Image (cartoon, grey):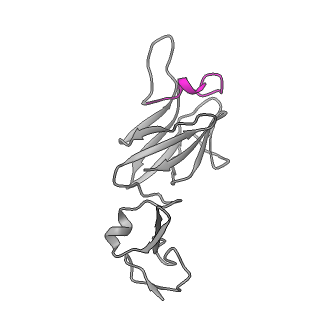
Amino acid sequence: MVQCPNCGYENPDHEILCIRCGLPLEITRDGTTRRLESAADAANFPRWGTARLGKERKLLLHIRGHDKPLVVHISDTLILGRRDADTGEAPEIDLADYGAQELGVSRRHAAILVEDDALKVMDLGSANSTFMNGQKLIAHQARILRDGDELRLARLVIRINFA
């Protein structure tokens, strides 16, 4: 049995995540595996599918068709969209250089926000909708964003990773 350093639950030896609280019991880094020594260890390591940010509070936006991810530092609210050529107004995350206009992305398409200690995504009433993991978001209704989620703004696809 492996005791969870966070909640103390006794998990079967083959488990990697705690059955009760979902925190990792083992971490693979650089090809090595080790058991977490404490709850503090677990709290500082974002895992795939988690809604918890790493201590650096950064996101990596992997935009389909582009090799290098866009690195974004988290603030309370980040607007995703494209700059307005007429007014010069641009959102916090300007996707114009990634073909946003041709792919149907609105000027103020979606928002990533920190709410209730979780990262969330919300469609801002965009013309061509926002999808998370293939499911259409309801405009102005925030949904929890997790490490590894895929966002589609119109036809622009972005995989989100926490750093």
**Residue 47 percent location from the top left of the image:** 48, 61
Q: Residue drawn 40% across and 50% down?
A: 115
Is 97 left, or right, of 64 in this rendering?
Answer: left
Q: Is residue 64 left or right of residue 83?
A: right
Front residue of this view, candidates 133 and 11: 11
In the displayed image of the protein, which residue is found farthest to the bottom? 1
Q: Identify which residue, 131 or 49, lies in the foreground.
A: 49
Determine the residue positioned at 46% across, 85% down. 2
Q: Is residue 139 above or below residue 82?
A: below
Residue 127 locus on image (x, y percent): 63, 29
Q: In the figure, 82 relative to 118: above or below?
A: above
Answer yes or no: is residue 47 visible: yes
- Count of numbered labels shown in the rendering: 0
Height in image: 12 above or below 19?
A: below
Q: Is residue 149 above or below residue 75?
A: below
Q: Does the magenta-highlighted stretch encompass residue 105?
A: yes
In front: 86, or 163? Answer: 163
Q: Is residue 109 magenta?
A: no
The residue stretch that appears in magenta: 93-107
Q: Of helix, strand and loop, which mostly describes the magenta segment?
A: loop
Q: Position of residue 154 (x, y in %)?
A: 65, 33
Residue at the far top: name it. Answer: 86
- Residue 54: x %, y % from top left: 38, 55
User: From this viewpoint, is residue 140 visible?
Assistant: no
Give the residue displayed 42% in from the left and 39% down from the top: 72
Residue 118 placement: quadrant = bottom left
